[in-house]
Image: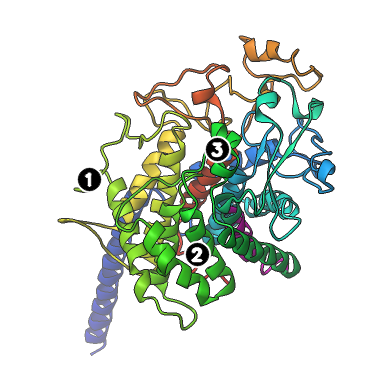
Amino acid sequence: MGKMGERVKSQGYFGWFIVMVVLGVVAFAVVFTYKKKYGYLPGTVSSKYGDALTVAMQFFDIQKSGKLVHNKIPWRGDSALNDGKSAHVDLSKGMYDAGDHMKFGFPMAFTATVLSWAILEYSVHMNAVNQLQPAKDSLKWITDYLMNAHPKHDVLYIQVGDPVADHKCWNRPEDMTEKRPLTMVNPSKPGSDVAAETAAALASASLVFKSSNATYSSLLLRHAQDLFVFADEYRGSYSKSIPEVRAYYDSTGYGDEILWAASWLYYATKDSTYLDVVTGKDGQKYANWGTPTWFSWDDKLPGTHVLLSRISFFGLDDDADIDNLNEYRRTAEAIMCNLLPDSPTATGSRTEGGLIWVNKWHALQQPVASAFLALVFSDYMLTSETQKLECDTESFSPSDLRKFAKSQADYVLGDNPMKMSYLVGYGSKYPQYVHHRGASIPADAKPSCKNGFKWLKSHKPNPNVATGALVGGPSKYDKYIDSRNNTMQGEPSTYNSAVLVGLLSGLVTYSSVPKFFL
């Protein structure tokens, strides 16, 4: 009887051992499959994308204007301290647009909106690599400026500096002596596009700061609501009101910004009247439902479609009607099908190296921005447990979208025919002749407006590394000419950095996104 009991006991142990082995094999298979799909395990941090994000975030510090606080860039100092004084407003903050010393409000506001969106979706990811606070600091540097640029209900300063005069100089921002005229929109010179984009920036930022600085968040939201009323009441494109801006940031229309701003204001206020804007006559007139376009500083429709698809995925945290919002998700799905390389409706606009190709100027803008949208949409699918995206006769999973997003990020980081990182400061090979005045001139030099051109023409690499700069990018043949005079390929911009920060933040780790912006 004792031996029988021992035999049964040993068989029980053996059975449990078999169960444990099977469970181990299953667990290994799950882990292996996940890692094969995503490159790392859930909850773990990808050092590759974490390091890249840490690098990319530094470009915002390089671009800061004004009295610098806790300056981390040894070759940068205070600059443009008198911006706005002629109109009795403080426009010293904000960020320089690109490699020059201009402050263009339209793309700067877009930078803030995208940076806010990235923080709202991926704050946990950013925090995992200690980049959440730097992102919020950079965002506030812009939003401080944008609020100061809105001193009255129907006045918005949208530009500091004269681009013609500015581009006749090559010196450091710390040494500027040229005049810095101001450009504004108002009822007689309306700019619904730039006013609405600024409203979107401030509304989205109000969500970012809501839990940490409620007073500041409320101030942002008041400006955002006021600006939206201004944009709505005095309709018109700033490019038509002020023809001089066409040479640099020519807006193709204001309808997309109206919808974009209304979307962000809905999330910030939960006021369903903003949903009425996107589902009513403005939506019908401007949303371009069913037709994919390219997300950029000028075209906010793709971002709007993806942003509003949140409601379809997660519902509303109020009683608003969502029936008329389905067109936005349908169009977001069409955008995704356009991006996926194996989709029957995939765009053929790609380089041989696999990069989405839209424009030779700032060539990386659309592929990086598109990859950011694809990543966000894939995470909406995962969080809502949506398993399939239908593209005509084929279906795709969230992992397919993530794979596409990674392909564009990896191209930027060096997996390209040039074997070069287009993110300055990342990897062992990156552009050395970035078209950027401050980076090209030694920090101890004090050249005048004209004398600095010898550094533009110099054949030596930049003495200062513009860490975090995302250069314009390669040609459609995957070629890049590293020359300081190659403005088309070699000039970075803050708005391109914003979409890259969003993309890299989403890839840092893998987790669900928040269902609601609290």
The residue at which mark 3 appears reads as: 249
Cα distance, mark 1 to mark 3? 34 Å
Give the residue at x 72% y 70%.
214
- Residue 401 visible in the snapshot: yes
Numbered range of the magenta stretch: 197-213
Callout 2: 10 Å neighbours few (<14), some, many (20+)? many
Closer to viewer: mark 3 or mark 2: 3
Amino acid type, label 2: Ser
Residue farthest front in this picture: 188
Name the main secondary structure of what is drawn in magenta.
Answer: helix
Instruction: Give residue 342's mark.
Output: 1
Callout 1: 10 Å neighbours few (<14), some, many (20+)? some
Query: Sequence-wise, which precedes: disc 1 or disc 2?
Result: 2
Closer to viewer: mark 1 or mark 2: 2
Residue 83 vs residue 129, the one in the foreground: 83
Q: Secondary structure at mark 1?
A: loop
Q: Quadrant of residue 485?
A: top right
The residue at which mark 2 appears reads as: 263
* Quarter occupied by the C terminus: bottom right
Q: Secondary structure at mark 2?
A: helix
| Above or below 364: residue 11 | below
Q: In the rendering, at what x and y percent does residue 137 appear?
A: 70, 51
Q: In the rendering, at what x and y percent does residue 398 appear?
A: 32, 57
Amino acid type, label 3: Tyr
Q: In the rendering, at what x and y percent does residue 125 appear?
A: 54, 56
Q: Residue 200 magenta-drawn?
A: yes
Residue 268 vs residue 515, the one in the foreground: 268
Instruction: Give residue 101's mark.
Output: none
Amino acid type, label 1: Asp
